[in-house]
Amino acid sequence: MIITENRIMLKKERQAQIIKQINLHNKVLSSDLSLELNVSEDTIRRDLNELAQEGKIVKVHGGALSKSYNFTATQAETYAYDEKHIIAQKTISLFQDGMTILCSGGTTIRTIANQLPENLNVTFFTVSPLISLELVEHPNTEVILLGGKLSNSSKISVGGEVVAKINEIKADLCILGVNGFDEDGISDSDYEIVQVKKAMIKASKKVITPMISEKLNSSLRLQVCSAEEVDYLITELPPEHELLSAFHHKVKHIL
Amino acid sequence: MIITENRIMLKKERQAQIIKQINLHNKVLSSDLSLELNVSEDTIRRDLNELAQEGKIVKVHGGALSKSYNFTATQAETYAYDEKHIIAQKTISLFQDGMTILCSGGTTIRTIANQLPENLNVTFFTVSPLISLELVEHPNTEVILLGGKLSNSSKISVGGEVVAKINEIKADLCILGVNGFDEDGISDSDYEIVQVKKAMIKASKKVITPMISEKLNSSLRLQVCSAEEVDYLITELPPEHELLSAFHHKVKHIL
DNA sequence: TAAAAACCTGCAAAAACACGCAATGATTAT
DNA sequence: ATAATCATTGCGTGTTTTTGCAGGTTTTTA
């Protein structure tokens, strides 16, 4: 179908079309979209990256796949595996026996859960069913799953009940997966998720944000907290790396 | 189901297909995949090596094998898949739009969750993080995850808090995975799980117990409920099968 | 043990990508 | 209204990824 009547297409409108295509076919090719929507492949790529950042689709080389595509979760997890391994080890070094740890979802955190040493004796609270399943395999950890309405996009529990439940917890650490992080702090694109993350931060003595360095200096629509509220910023880079220099006087520690 | 509708196949898409094949047949040959997916054997080999490095599959000379432990795998590799497929279809025939359905865990229930029709518009409550993840992929279902301490053995939420939460629910159906079932009713081996299942039964108008026939006439240490409390006993067998004859005057319906 | 199949390595072409820059158009401030 | 600012987009440039193939090596099998 060739559309000539509408010369100008708004960015939002175009992205909506892309989502529609993905829901329909479970995949899209950048080259196809470029032809169909009459914009350059660069623009399509930028759109796909934005939508992927917002968690609506999964970007792959050559196009994008639907999030509900059977294997995207595990594919995404193993994306940047080496980096996430380093991050996991750094994060785990902060864990101590007897601690109560509150954690959100996300593939980075899943890697941490997966690499947890056997002998560690801690209690985990999590809003992510996926993380809970990973953690429960460890013999010496107690896992408390925080229930609620399950968010379609992020697969974590959200809603007032979860927030209320989190408010009852006193945790030593909060391991927070982040989608956007810059000098202004942590940001996210979903209102419900922001509420949960805010509650998690409030309930914990220390806030740890493990993330791949490529997430640095990206920001999304909604503010979760300021950079000053972050106790440990953990990336795969050495702390003295220049990409991190802007954050040294903002967050308390960088690992 | 191998689709070659599109000339171009994304790499990740192809790898997803490979994993699907492996989960289905438990093994694949590089040469077969090369023909089916229309790429060179070199490419297949590279894919298999990548997937193996990611821990998704086990690479062997000539092809690859499925990995035993893998909770994001599709249903295909679950034990007695064909039987469970029949059971799932029978169970789903009882679902109607607008219903509130409470369900426990187990592989049989997971198959049901997986085969749920897209257009079904129901609300699910579940104590199983695994089932919740399966259900949340369906666009028209609302999923409420019931949180609590996660049981190491059965991977479902247990404890007083879950029971209390279940007591607040008024569900139309209760889909109960069972480990032991005979003329005396449902039995289980774990005290905590029994408490949760009892609460689930009390909270629901109708109780459905889907199970493969080999579970029939087995019993465990702890009693969950009597056979008379079961509204629908669903197995892969036709209702008039002799194995079921002893139950016809016990449970209300047999499918 | 010899042939066949599977494998690995390096290479090259095409495609996809990332980055900076400039032009365009829209929005806001003055 | 005009200027300043910002967002969006396309293009040039150089990089990375993907893929198939050639050639030599290893493993399997008969």
Image (spheres, coloured by chain):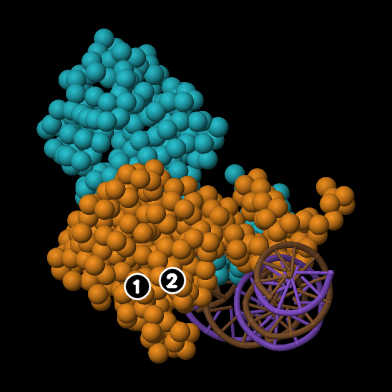
Chain colours: A orange, B cyan, C brown, D purple
Left or right of A219, for residue A136: left
Q: Nearer the viewer, residue B27 or B75?
A: B75
At horizontal 61% and vertical 65% (from top left) the residue drawn is A49
Q: How many marks?
A: 2
The residue indicated by pointer 1 is: A230
Q: Quadrant of residue C16?
A: bottom right
Mark 1: which amino acid? Answer: Val
The residue indicated by pointer 2 is: A185
Q: Nearer the viewer, residue A236 or D23?
A: A236
Q: Position of residue C2 (x, y in %)?
A: 56, 76
Mark 2: which amino acid? Answer: Gly
Q: Position of residue D13 (x, y in %)?
A: 75, 87
What SS does tag 1 mark?
loop
At horizontal 26% and vertical 56% (from top left) the residue drawn is A125
Mark 1 or mark 2: whose residue is earlier in sequence: 2
The crowd level at tag 2 (other Cα within 10 Å; few <14, some 14-19, many 20+) is many
Q: CA distance from mark 1 to mark 2?
A: 8 Å
Q: Nearer the viewer, residue B29 or D28?
A: B29
Q: Is residue A161 above or below residue B27?
A: above
At horizontal 47% and vertical 47% (from top left) the residue drawn is A152
At horizontal 49% and vertical 51% (from top left) the residue drawn is A153
Q: Are marks 1 and 2 in contact (CB under 8 Å)?
A: yes
Left or right of A23, for residue B142: left
What SS does tag 2 mark?
strand
